[in-house]
Image (cartoon, grey):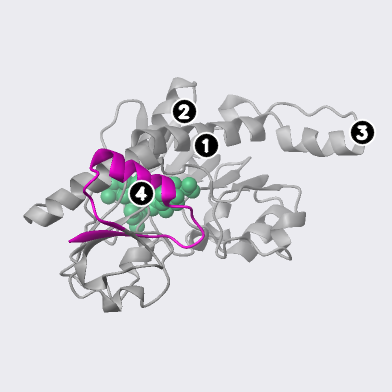
Amino acid sequence: MSLLLIAPNRDLTKLREELLNLDANLDVELWPNVEHKNRVTFAVAWNHPKNIFSNYSNLNSVSSLGAGVNHLLNDEDLTSDISLARLITPSLKNEMAEYVLQAILAYRHHTTRYTDQKKEGYWDKHTIIPKEDAVIGIMGLGEMGLSTAELLIENGYKVNAWSSSKKDVARIDSFSENELDDFLAQSNILICLLPLTEKTDGILNLDLFKKLKTPSYLINVGRGQHLVEEDLIYGIDTGVLDGAWLDVFEEEPLPSNHLFWNRPKIMITPHVAAVTDPREAAQQILENYKRSLSGMDLINAVKREKGY
Ligand code: NDP
Ligand code: OXD
């Protein structure tokens, strides 16, 4: 029996090392140099190539290397008899919350404008956007959404949250799926922390932006496919949105000729809001590997019927 790690363009040697630190007897294969495909029962995958799993006849479980699982659910070779899981670690939740907080502060305090002004040697002052005009609207109150909401509340922000089902969480105004318009009308800074599903694909579009309370701003840390890119540019150019902070894109890496690069009101980071820590990841992967070998339910299992 062996465990396969597969994530093109990512260095997995540290994760392999951490797994072997936990159990030196583990048989860990690193894609693409897989010696015995028929021994692989458990895989950890991130942005894996299409059809890669068709030759692994004994595979019974696959874990995402991150919190998102759209790459696993979209893979036709990962049929319903294969259990799916994702990684949820304390540092992933903390990093996401801090990343979102710094984006909000940078928007309110005009950090990117001052960075641009410094390059030009240009002195000009901008009024800080007051907290009353920075009511937060979090789309997706799951693992990442909740930790983000908690940090923002600690920092004195009013937080609304929208999720499939209504939640009863102290100091968060929760809106259910059919209350989207009310949620938007009461939120200035929209943070997308939704999973990518059929329902949420293209959800960040001009119609939705127009329903936000003004001034409005977008932070997308979910998936690039949530956003209709031309609607963002149109929304900013027509004053519907003050700007946007984006960490995820339809195509990653963002092509060098993409229109977003030259837009001063769009901040870009290269999908780094929260990055899986190899040590924490190794513990969860090993736990799930053991569980899969004993036929137990996986921790942080993906609910296929929900689509996330
Ligand atoms: P969870 O599955 O824990 O939470 C998803 C939330 O979205 C839940 O609250 C769920 O509602 C809600 N939701 C799902 N579908 C809908 C819908 N149609 N309408 C309204 N609400 C909906 O996900 P995580 O918090 O772990 O992660 C969220 C996403 O963040 C990931 O899928 C990934 O794309 C992204 N991510 C990005 C990272 C980065 O570095 N940029 C790092 C980590 C994650 P309910 O609670 O009722 O089920
Ligand atoms: C994740 C991510 O889903 O990094 O964990 O996007």
Which numbered marker is on residue 10? none
Q: What element carries label 2?
A: helix
Q: Earlier in the sequence, mark 3 or mark 4?
A: 4
Q: Which amino acid does label 3 sit on?
A: Gly
Q: Earlier in the sequence, mark 4 or mark 1?
A: 4
Mark toward the viewer: 4 or 1 = 4
Tell me which residue sits at (44%, 27%) in the image: 151
Residue nearer the viewer, 239 or 45: 45
Kindly identify which residue carries mark 2: 152
Residue 21 drawn in magenta: yes
State how far apart marks 3 and 2 are (Cα): 33 Å
- For residue 31, which quarter of the picture? bottom left
Which numbered marker is on residue 121? 3
Mark toward the viewer: 2 or 1 = 1
Which numbered marker is on residue 16? 4
Residue 73 seen from this side:
yes
- Asked whether the residues under the numbered discs 2 and 1 touch, taking CB atoms below 8 Å apart as contact, a structural biologist would say yes
Mark toward the viewer: 3 or 2 = 3
Q: What element carries label 4?
A: helix
Please state the horizontal and vertical placement of residue 244, each as a whole percent of the image: 63, 47
Residue 88 seen from this side:
no
Mark toward the viewer: 3 or 4 = 4
Please state the horizontal and vertical placement of residue 202, each as a whole percent of the image: 49, 64
Q: In this view, does 302 lie to the left or right of 142?
A: left
Magenta region: 1-28
Which numbered marker is on residue 100? 1
